Image (cartoon, rainbow, N blue to C red):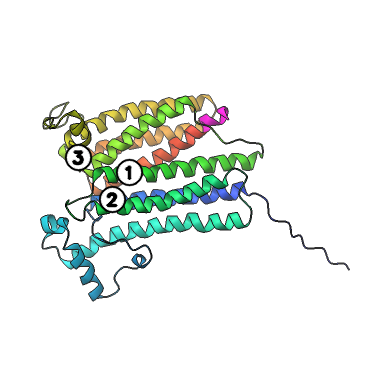
Amino acid sequence: MANNPVSTAAPGPRPAALARWLWGVALLVILVVAVGGITRLTESGLSITEWKPVSGVLPPLNEAGWQEEFHKYQQIPEYKEINVGMSLAAFKAIFFWEWLHRVLGRLVGGAMLVPLIWFAARRAIPAGYGWRLFALTSLVGLQGAIGWWMVASGLEYRTDVSHFRLATHLLTALFLLAGLVWTARDLTALARDPAARPARLTGAAIAVIAILFVQLLLGAWVAGLNAGQVANTWPAMNDHFVPEGIDWSDGAWMALTNDPFLLHFLHRWWSWVAALALLWLARTLARRGATGVATMLVAVVAAQMMLGILTVLTGVSLWIAVLHQVTGAILVATAAAGLHRLGRAAA
C-alpha cells in the first residue's frame, strides 16, 4: 500500500485565529486599566522607584530586599511630605498594586509579541495586516516607556505624577484597546468573506471620536489632580452650578488645564455631549441592522453615566471609581466596534 505524500505547503492566512488572539489581548488591556485605576486611587504608583524590565518581574524575596525597596521609597517627596512614618507593612500594600500593574503590562507585551512571531512564521497573517499588527505590538512597548516617564515625573520634585503624563499613559492604553478591537473586527469580516475590505473612518466617526477624546482627556486630568474630590454633590457642585474656587489668576489656559474645580465641572457636563454623540451612533447602527452593538453601546453609556455620578456622591469610593474607569475602557471598546460597523459601508 503506497504511502500518501506529506504536504509541505505552508499554512494559509488565519484571520479568525488572529481575531480571537486580539480579542484576548483586548481583555488583558481592560484588566491592566482596572489595576491601573486601583494603583492610582490607592496612591501606589510611586512605590517602585526604578524601572527594571527584566529583574523587576520578581518582587523582593526576603526582608533585606523589602528594606532596600522601602529605603528607596523613603527618599522621594511623596514619602517625606505625605507618608512619613509609613510602616513596612503599609509600604508592601502599595508596592503590590504597582508591581501587579507593571507585571500585567509585561504580560500584554508578551501576549502581543510571541503570537505575532508565531503567526508570522506560519505565514498566517493576511496580506496588508502585518504592518498593523507590528504597530499595535510596538505601541505596547511605547506604553511601557510612557508609564516609566509618568512615574519619573513624581520622583524628584512632586508628591504625585504629572496629570499630563498620566493622561498620555491612559489615553495610549485606550487607543491600543480601540486598535485591537478595530483590527479584530476587520479580521473577523475577512474570515467570513475573503473579499472583505478593512472598514474606514467616516467623517461622522471622526466627530464622535473627537468628542469622546475630549471627555477621556478631561477624565484623565480629573484623575491625575484628584479633582473628583472637590465636590461630592450632584448636579450642583457644592451648592453651585458653576463651582466656586476656580483659580483664574494665571489665565484661562492655566485654569483650563490645571484647575481641579474647573476640570471637574467640565468633565461632568461634557459627558452629556459625549453621551448624545454615542447615542446618535447607537441609533444609526440600529437603523442599519446592527442592533446588538447598538444595544450594548446604550447600556454601557448609561452605566458609565451612573457610575460617574455615584463616584461623585460617594466621595470617590475606591471600587466605584475603579468600576467607572473600567466601564470607560469598555465604552471605548464598544464605541470602536460601533464605529467599525459604521465604516464597513464606507469600505
Q: Decide: few, some or many residues near mark 1? Use Cα within 10 Å; few <14, some 14-19, many ≥20.
A: many
Q: Is residue 191 left or right of residue 148?
A: right
Q: Which residues are magenta?
A: 341-347
Residue 305 horizontal/vertical position (percent): 31, 34
Q: Quadrant of the C terminus?
A: top right
- Check disc 3 and report its element: helix, strand or loop: helix
The residue under label 1 is 168
Which secondary structure dominates the residues rendered in magenta? helix
Q: Decide: few, some or many residues near mark 2? Use Cα within 10 Å; few <14, some 14-19, many ≥20.
A: many
Residue 38 horizontal/vertical position (percent): 28, 52
Q: Is residue 298 left or right of residue 68?
A: right
The residue under label 2 is 150
In front of the other: 288 or 134: 134
- Label placed on residue 227: 3
- Whether residue 111 is visible, yes or no, is yes
Residue 143 horizontal/vertical position (percent): 38, 50
- The answer for how far apart the CA atoms under marks 3 and 1 are is 17 Å
Q: Is residue 316 located in the magenta-colored stretch of the structure?
A: no
